[in-house]
Image: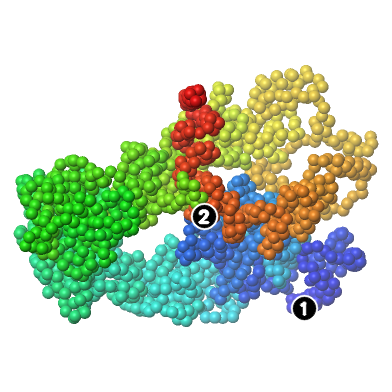
Amino acid sequence: MAKVDTKKRKRHDESKEKTSFRVEEMEENFPRGGKEDVTPLERRVLRQKAKEDVLFNETGDTNGTESTAAGVKRAMTGTNTRVVKKRKTKLLEFPRPKTLHPGSLLLGAVQDIHPLEVLVSLPYNMRGSIAITDISDVLTELAKAEANLGDDGAEVAEQQSVPRMEQLFQIGSLLPCYVTAVRDNKMVSLSINPRLVNANLSASDVKADMVIPGWIRSVEDHGYIVDFGVAGKDGFLLKKNAEEFVETSNKGKPLSRGQVVQCLILGGADARSVPVTINPSRVCLAVLPATSTVILQSLLPGVLVNISLQEVALNGAIGTFLGSFEGWVGVHHLPERSHSLDNVQLKKKMKGRIVWVDVQVKTVGLSLCKHIVQNECLQFGSLEIGDKFEDAMVVWVDSPRALILDLGNSVFGFCPLGLVYDDKKDAIGKEYKIGSHHACRLVQFNRLDGFAIVSLQPSVLDRPYMKFADLKVGEAVEGKVERHGDYGMTVSLTDTIRGMVPRLHLADVDLKNPKARFKEGGAVKCRVLSLEPEKRRLLLTCKRSLVQSDKERLCDYSQAKPGEVYQGVIAAVREIGCVVRFFGDVVGRVHKLELSSIQLVTDPKAVFSVGQTVECRVLECKPASRELKVSFRLDRGDPLAAVDGLDVSVVMDLEVMGVTSGGINLRAPSGELAFLPTPHLSDYPSLCAPLLKIHQAGLEKATREGTQYTLKKVMVVCKKLNFRPALVTLKSSIVEQLGKEGKGPAFSDLKVGMVRVGFIKKAMPYGCFVEFPNNCCGLAPIKSLSDEFVVNPSDIYQEMQTVRAKIAEVDSVKERFLVTLKPSDLKMCSRLSQKEVYEDSLVQFERLLGERDQLLRDQGVLEGPLVKAFRPGSCTEAEVKGVQGNLMMLELGDRVKAKGVLQTPDLEVGSNVTVCILDVDMSDSSLIVSLNPRLVESCSAMKPVKGNKKKLQHSVMELGTTVMTTVEYKTPYYVLCSCSTIAGVYPAFGIFDAVQLGCVPDYVAKLKPGEQISAVILRQASVLRSALDGPPIVHLLSAPPTRQHPSTTQLHMGPVEVNVGDIIDVVVQKVAPTQINVKHRLLRGRIHCTMLKDSVEKGFFFSKGIGLGDVIRARVIACNEQHSEGASNTLVSKKTTVLDLTTKPSLMDPSVPITKEVMEVDLTPGKVVTGYITEVGKGLHIALSPSILVHAPPLLVTNRIEILKKLSSHYTPGEAVECTVVKHGSLGRCKGLVSLMGPAAEPKVGDVIVGHPLSLLSKEGGLLVSLPFSTVGRVDITNVTDHYKDNPLQAVKKLDFIKCYVLSVDSDKIELSLRASRTGEEVIKDEVASESPVDPEVRCVEDLEVGQLVRGYVKASSNVGIFVRLGPSIDGRVKITNLCDGFVKDFKSIHPVGKLVKAKVLGVEVGEKKVELSLRLSHVDPAAAKELRKTQGKSKGKKVRPTSDGESAEEESSLSEEEVTGVPSEEEDGEGEGSEKVPKATLKPTGGFVWDTSQLKNELSSSEDEEEEDKMEEPPAKKSKRQKRATKMAEEASLYSTEQVLMDTNRPPETPDDFDRLLVSRPNCSAIWVQYMAFHLHTAEVDKARAIAQRALKTISFREEHEKLNVWVALMNLENIYGTPESLVQVFEEALKQNDTQTVFFKLASIYTRAKKFDLAEQLYQTMIKRFGASVKVWTHYGLFLMKQGRLQAARSLLQKCLKNIHSKQHHVDAISKFAQLEFQYGEPERGATEFESLVSTYPKRVDLWSVYMDMMLKKGEVKRVREIFERAIHLKISAKKMRFIFKRYVEFEKAHGTSAHVECVREKARTYVESKALDNAAY
């Protein structure tokens, strides 16, 4: 029978479909929704057909109650609302990956969040992913910019960074998605870019109450501009409409540019910019009303609509919504999750959401699931991926596709066909019938459908891992290749586990085409390389040598055992060895000596490559410090065994294996290795590099000849363990000491007072470690390094430097000892006579000369011409090549370089001079010469000694005689000087008492070239080329210098060339708050406050102890060229060099290169740094380096309000402060935020902290307060004061800083209190309020008692009563009956929100936290109520209105009876006396009390909507006479109001006719024309706006040039926004023809800048400077544009180009002044001050420059510096008129920023000036 019924029903349906072809055709042409296009004839035919259907009851309706209108409606819509019988004949086709196509819209729920993508659950068990480039256009641009940062090197320091995905999305949130593609793995590629999601929308489709996605385009002062991706329609989001979203969904962080949000249109849909809200409480509950005129293309997923189910299908139901739209509801998306179609309720109105829209096939999917309708994240409890269920019951079977199983605890599992069997099958078997039980495993969640995806496959049930935590490092796994990328290959192990195979681990060899080897979708075997489960990061390796290896894998440092062999991969190859990576995070290092057991590997990069698989033997492992040392020498024995064959103090010949910059690799005859570091080649560092060159050349020569190169007489110093070679040396002092003593002393042999020769092992900030032979190492504390104060030990001693050390202390228990390197300690220990001191110094110096002479004999070290020219004491001609500091650079014959101290002030470059050769500098292969005239004259006249042509006459000097010497040149080990004798002046070597090697005595260090000192002759000649042909040797006496050489009095004059890295002497010219202005000869420079010292103490002023005229030795770190006006009459400006200098000891070492990294500062959060205050304003600006400026906000400076109010009184520019880095990032000019109160700390309960009021919370009745370290707290209105007062929050909002007491700290909010009882200070001082009783704190319901009188603030009003805020989380309810003793109709106006009221507690329910209150005067104040009743009885003609707080107000009784009693008058109720009298209305409660005001509002609004719908369905009734009369009066009133509106001249135009009327009277007003254009643009009529602009240009008179220009600008703006680039260029060219060309260029540049088309703006500026190169305005505007973009260096370079192109001297001054002002506003204020200083010094009579300079400095808060500028200005020699102007400004300045004493002082100076001028005039 069932089959017969089905066939009959089918035939009946087919016949019905044939008879309704006309309706279907109309439906095909006009699919559901949209505007009807039916002719009147067709409408009559349809209406007649509907009547016939009713008469003949064709549809089987027996009731006959359906109206004609309903029948017409059914005929028009093609639906039958009277069908109540369920039919299951249709099979609904829901979307699947195979049927999806690009352009479909789906609703997705965020499933998982990854760094670069978001995984989304889609309807009907589909999955999708959203890439970071598919969110919005802004985020796409930012992501591309960051990706290209490493390629083009662009600096994006001030650009917004790409926010993390966790900041943009939350798990479970619903997103409307646009399908872009479907990948092979059935993963759907999605996009939530509103430009794609809203692609089918037009501006007219955006209606009120519509939810539409948009992205934040810009952040404004009071809100955000939202871009919907719809042309001609934007949204504006007030910040108050985003507060709830920010707190709940955005983790309290403000919205960022590019973030996508769901917006509810509030109204004003006809405007171009519509108001929106994103607060979830409104967006989630917003229902699209049925009255909205929408079409299918305008429907979006996620929209909430009212649905009525009409028909039941085989796998779902069909419902209607929004009038005539039809949608499909799957069986799993029905309201009840019973997975059955038997209980589907038809014709019932329900709420549901659209989950998919397919415009091509014209289908819409709906969902009635509770969690989707309420927009809530579905929770699965404690379930995790990988959980197994042994007894899951089948509750639904879709035989060809899927199963649904009950997992328990109201959780259902969904199992698609592909997860049922391991083999591919077409349908589900009979064994999975409803009610059967099976074992399954959880593999994924679908948060949209609300299912846990499970698998019944045996392979999945037995799989060892289902999540990252199940994997183990080193484990072998199998997966499928998912995709290839630039960094490697992505492998999918399961649906939820993905891993990355780096390119180095794809194979054992480098693959040129990995895609050919590993095809996408193919299986691959891998091994887990590293794993971070908490971050979901998995690295795999596909190297066959690692995957198929059975050897033990090294996965942890604790697993490494010395001697064991493990496999690894080379991660890096360096000069000193290789870095090997094992499994996990284990990394080992291989020294180059352990790279091979066959030969020494000198160049590891030539032998090994990154990615190479190697086997390593563990030598040493320290798990605590994560240090692992391994070796490639697998044939080694025990790595801990000692090295045999090389004993300490053994002198032997060793074979040279290789020479590097670090030293020489040697091998002993026994085969053991040794190493000779470069500093161990000599005791003297200047000779080590040349000696290394000798051995390098000798090794190369031996290699060419096939012989061995041997290093002779090498002594073993230290015998090492492990793989390190023995350390050998050639230092003569160490070799001599060990030669005398034999084997070096052990630790037990060390005695206090013993003096040993050793070398510096390492220099640390607290001292130096000194190593002695035989592996003894001691510490020399910083206080024991020198007799002078030492700041940085590395400034005095270098690694491997030879030193003498005295044992100061020995700790035999810990086997440690301390040494001292002080010369005074060593001298006391030596106890040598003066003669012995001379001999010791002489021995050391002759040893130096001997080693150097050996180098000179080797022609391979120095060039032949240099060696040939080196004859000390000989004179020759030289050409001056340049001057560097106080040194002159010369060139002798054969291009031999020379240098000497500058002694002639007027020396010119290119001139020829006669010099005397003194010595040779081995470090730079140059000669040292002297220009001393007396020395040159004496040496030129010197004659050879008789009998020996090589010996010169100075060898006849007598030994032991005292002579006067003049310093010519200084080196670290000796002084080159000239000796004055009776016979003449001769060159000599001056040595000194060097107790410590390389340590210059203080009296020698203070000597300057040209000063004289006494000396004793020790040798008549020195060694030169193996003969005594060198200058004599003298010992300098420790006597003060007698006089200065006359030729050195003006060394600071003359031209000079300075390079970066030079050390020069500078003279202090001015001490500014943040820098010291200095001068070096003719060059100006500055020493920034941060470049003076390496470390300073808090409160230190950098300028302390520095005065004008002081000479400071500094090092050049930068040379900046600037243009300045000279005093000559030339029109071309001079180019000057401004030097940036430093006096930091760590940078004064010439060997330290000057790089950008040296001056960088670590800004890691939490790092403690020291800087100098540069500016005091809204916080502190602190300079950490010349280029790094940080900001300390007021709340991070101090916790004392009195200091915060007057920061300038407690902090001064130039003061050193210690601060902690809080945040690193670009903040305008500043590079980060710092705190002067220590590291960031979370507030704790009970803390009293200082905060800054932010904004009022109108809904919650509170105040947001900004707290230190970027936290925000909330102050409830009841916690402001102890004595309540009206509007307390308004008074607090005006304060700058307030004290706050922390009441509670939760994860999402901080509750604060401002009560004086908590903070100890009254925030609002009110004497009247302070005398009132204290209002107690109500923290919980238990604090209240029945009958208690309390005060509170009205929180909300509704139709059933009001709510009163009693505490932060306690609200009380006041019913309408308890508002007052009498009846008041409009009680909401009497009790507005925020009003302070007094109430009596009527009831308290502790369990439900409910409080019932009364505001009746009889309850609050019975005495006052009694008195009020007496007064009310006596008054006549007046009405007494009782108020809630006990007051009464009397007013004239002018109200009608209806207003008082609520009863309508008889005239309105009826037309005559016979009408019935309506009984008096009473106020009775109709239901329970509603505590949630938002719910109350929703219920009220829903009831109003239902009433409106009922009214719309009712047929219009016949109008009465009274209604007709009222209608006529309304029409007359409307006509009268229209006439009044037309007569109002101040009314703004609203229609085109209004604009035309205005333009008739004012045709030349451009403002009206522009408003007319804007009117058409708001309605998206761009062509009409263009026509209006052309009409305006023709109408406006040609004399009104400015008015026409305004129209042209408006037209260019229109084309820029709505037109094409070609149309904009066309309008621009036409505007150039009819307006001032330069003005039009400026207008277009401004348009480009506002539209953020910076590339086009820059191109336009480039054209302008070429076309208007003589205009200063063009250059300054271009400079302003660059400065605003943060391109400071480009703007400064532009100034140089400007000065070259502008030839007017006056314009030069204007340009420099403008650019200096830009430096103050957008660049470095100190640079701007420097430029103004240059201007006012060159043009002192330009009072306008002085005035601008003062204004700029005053804006920066530099009051002290402005006062100094005024003092300089009043002493200028200028006219009396100009001086009067300066004095007037000076007085005004002191009145505003000084005291009365300052003002009087200025007036006294003005009187003195006037008197002096009067005397001068009288004398004249």
Q: Say whether disc 1 or disc 2 marks the residue closer to the N-terminus.
A: 1
Asked where in the image residue 82 lies, by quadrant, the reply is bottom right
Tell me the quarter of the image containing the N terminus. bottom right
Q: Which mark, by number, is residue 447?
A: none
Density class for disc 2 (Cα within 10 Å; few <14, some 14-19, many ≥20) is: some
Q: Nearer the viewer, residue 340 or 707?
A: 707
Foreground disc of the pair 1, 2: 2
Above or below: residue 269 compared with residue 1395: below
Residue 956 vertical placement versus 55 (above, below):
above
Q: Is residue 685 visible?
A: no
Q: Position of residue 1430 (x, y in %)?
A: 74, 18
User: Which is more toward the observer, 892 or 582?
Assistant: 892
Query: In the displayed structure, would residue 1478 be above or below residue 801?
Result: above
Judge left or right: residue 1715 versus residue 552.
right
> Percent from the top left, x then y, of residue 1691?
51, 53
Looking at the image, residue 581 sits to the left or right of residue 950; the answer is right
Q: Secondary structure at mark 2?
A: helix
Q: Residue at x 21, y 41 (%)?
A: 1043
- Nearest the eye: 1281 or 1135: 1135
**Residue 7's mark?**
1
